[in-house]
Image (cartoon, rainbow, N blue to C red):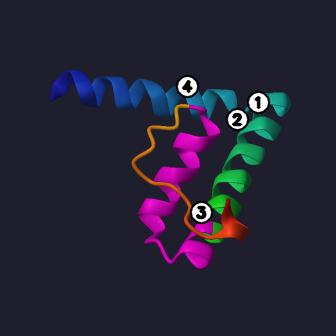
């Protein structure tokens, strides 16, 4: 558990330090906006919970695509 917390602290520190760089900040904001729009879209279009929609957006954006969630409506495919 301590290892996880230390890794999490290092991750947050890296993000905070990265936000000082304008290029990183732009990419980070673009990532957050893309995840927000994707999550809201799938929440409304498929009727999934916000957590499921965020999960699907992250998995799709990272190109992992586990296949455990899949859009069922034509408009959201």
Tag on residue 39? 3
- Residue lying farthest to the left in this orientation: 1
Disc 1 versus disc 3: distance between alpha carbons? Answer: 22 Å
Q: Note whether 27 is above or below 49 in the view shown.
A: above
Tell me: 62 left or right of 77: left
Based on the picture, tell me whether residue 59 belongs to the magenta stretch: yes
The C terminus: image quadrant: bottom right
Query: Is 58 or 6 nearer to us in this picture?
Result: 58
Residue depicted at x 51% and y 55%: 70
Which comes before the other along the chain, label 4 or label 3?
4
Whether the residues at callouts 3 and 2 have beta carbons within 8 Å, the answer is no
Disc 4/disc 2 C-alpha distance (Å) = 9 Å
- Dot label at residue 14: 4
Q: Earlier in the sequence, mark 3 or mark 2?
A: 2
Closer to the camera: disc 2 or disc 1?
1
Whether tag 4 and tag 1 are in contact, CB under 8 A, the answer is: no
Alpha carbons under labels 3 and 2: distance apart? 23 Å
Query: Which range of residues does the magenta coloring cover?
Result: 42-63
The residue mark sitting in front, 3 or 2, is 3
Which comes sooner in the sequence, label 2 or label 1? 2
In the picture of the structure, the residue carrying the numbered disc 1 is 24
Q: Residues within 10 Å of mark 4 (few under 14, many from 20)?
A: few
- Find residue 63 and report its image quarter: top right
Does the CB distance between marks 2 and 1 fall below 8 Å?
A: yes
Local secondary structure at mark 1: helix
Q: Identify the residue position indicated by label 2 in the image.
A: 19
């Amino acid at each position: 558990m301590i290892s996880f917390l230390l890794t999490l602290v290092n991750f947050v520190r890296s993000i905070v330090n990265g936000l000082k760089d304008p290029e990183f900040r732009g990419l980070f904001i673009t990532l957050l906006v893309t995840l927000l729009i994707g999550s809201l879209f799938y929440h409304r279009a498929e009727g999934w919970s916000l957590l499921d929609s965020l999960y699907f957006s992250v998995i799709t954006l990272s190109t992992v695509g586990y296949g455990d969630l899949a859009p069922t409506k034509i408009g959201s495919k």
